[in-house]
Image (cartoon, rainbow, N blue to C red):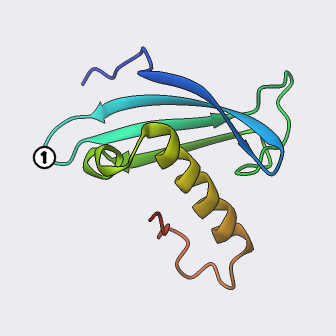
Amino acid sequence: MTYPTQPAAVFTLTIDAQEMTVRYLPYWTKGLAPYGHFEFKSPAEPRRRIPVSETGYRSYFAPMDEIEAAPSVEEYARAVALAIMAQKSGPSAEDADQLPLF
């Protein structure tokens, strides 16, 4: 399988006064359930903590139909980041792989 190498979008997302670089690759997987791929990265070298990751990097896959239903890729990425942050501070890790998006 060949994966896209060129991102469709690279943008800066600021949450809680902290910047993250977001790299988005649509249709990273093909088939019946195509997925897009988001990379949330620290803009600093060496990487520093960002709101969604202590290591400065977070990978996230999402169904293309959800991404395309969002008002924009940037708004979808913001919703994902906020959901990840809420999950980290939430009451339990029981639903760790379920992110509320909209």
Name the residue: 78% across, 44% down.
50
The answer to whether residue 44 is left or right of residue 3 is: right
> Which image quarter holds the N terminus?
top left
**Name of the residue lying farthest toward the front:** 71
The answer to whether 10 is drawn above or below residue 66 in the figure is above
What residue does disc 1 label? Answer: 32
Name the residue: 70% across, 68% down.
88
Name the residue: 85% across, 21% down.
45
The answer to which image quadrant residue 19 occupies is top right
Residue 32: where, in percent of width, then height? 13, 46
The answer to whether residue 11 is left or right of residue 24 is: right
Comparing 69 with 36, the one in front is 69
Comparing 39 with 55, the one in front is 39
Residue 96: where, in percent of width, then height? 55, 72
> Which image quarter holds the C terminus?
bottom left
The answer to whether 1 is drawn above or below residue 65 in the figure is above
Comparing 74 with 91, the one in front is 74
Mark 1 residue type: Leu
Circle 1 residues within 10 Å: few <14, some 14–19, many ≥20: few
